[in-house]
Image (cartoon, rainbow, N blue to C red):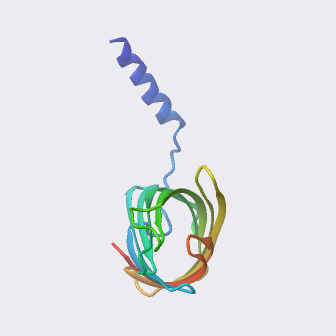
Amino acid sequence: MESTKYIKKALILATALSSSTAMANNFPYSFFEARVGTSPGTFGAQINQQFTENSHLVGQIESKFEGDWDINGGIGFNGPINEFADIYGQLLLHNVKDKSSDKFGDEMLTEVNIGLRVWLMQQIEVGAKYGQLFNSDTNKDIGSVHFRFHSTEQLSVGAEAKFSGIYGDQVTMTARFTF
C-alpha cells in the first residue's frame, strides 16, 4: 500500500518533468549498411534498429578478410536539434582480432561517441562524429566526417573519412538500406 503511493508520486513527477512537445527525428535510425574501405582495404556491415523514438541498437563488423575483425555492438541515442539537424551518440563494445591471433578477439575496447547529422540540401546529408576508444591500458581519439546522397527514402549512398579508427585513417564508400 505504501509502495503504491511512492510509485504514483514518481510517475506524476516524471510526467510533470517530461517535455510536452514531441519532435520526430530528421533522419532514419533503422537501416542496414554495407561498406568498402580503402587503404587498408576492408569490408563491413552495420545494422541499426530504432527501438524507441530516441534510442537505437547498433551492430557492426569490419574485416580485411585476413583472419582479422572488429565486431562491435551497443546502444545509441538520437534526437532532433532543429528541423534540419539531429544529434546522436553511441556506447559500443568492440571485440578486435588481428591476423596473428588464433583465438576469439585478443582485445576488448569500449567506444563512446557523439555525432551530428545535417541536411545540407533536400537529398544531401553531411555529418561528423567524435569519440574515444579505450580499455584499461589505452585511450584513443577517433572521428569521422561523412557525405550521403539519399536517392530514395529507402536507399542512400555515401562516403566517409575515418580518423584513427581500429584500421587507422581510412575512406569508406557506403550503401545504406532503410527499413
Q: Nearer the viewer, residue 45 or 108?
A: 108
Label tally:
0
The location of residue 137, given as percent across then percent down, is 63, 52
Residue nearest the viewer, comparing 67 with 123: 67
Name the residue rendered at 37%, 16% in the picture. 3
The residue under the point 45% across, 26% down is 10
Using residue 167 as the reference point, say whether residue 96 is left or right of it: left
Q: For residue 88, what is the image quadrant?
A: bottom right
Q: Residue 10, relative to residue 81: is it above or below?
A: above
Q: Is residue 122 visible?
A: no
Most foreground residue, 85 or 57: 57
The quadrant in which the C terminus is found is bottom left
Q: Quadrant of residue 146?
A: bottom right
Question: Image height check: is 157 above or below 136?
Answer: below
Relative height, residue 23 to residue 62 (above, below): above
Farthest residue toward the top?
Answer: 2
Residue 21 x/y as whole percent: 51, 50
In the rendered image, the quadrant that contains the N terminus is top left
In the image shown, does 31 or 68 lie closer to the viewer? 68
- Asked if residue 105 can be seen in this view, the reply is yes
Q: Which residue is pictured at 57% across the width and 67% down the height?
A: 83
In the image, residue 25 sits, relative to residue 45, either above or below, namely: above
Q: Residue 130 appears at what percent x and percent y? A: 64, 65
User: Where residue 94 sits in the image (x, y, percent)?
Assistant: 48, 60
Could you tell me which residue is drawn at 38 percent across and 67 percent down?
30
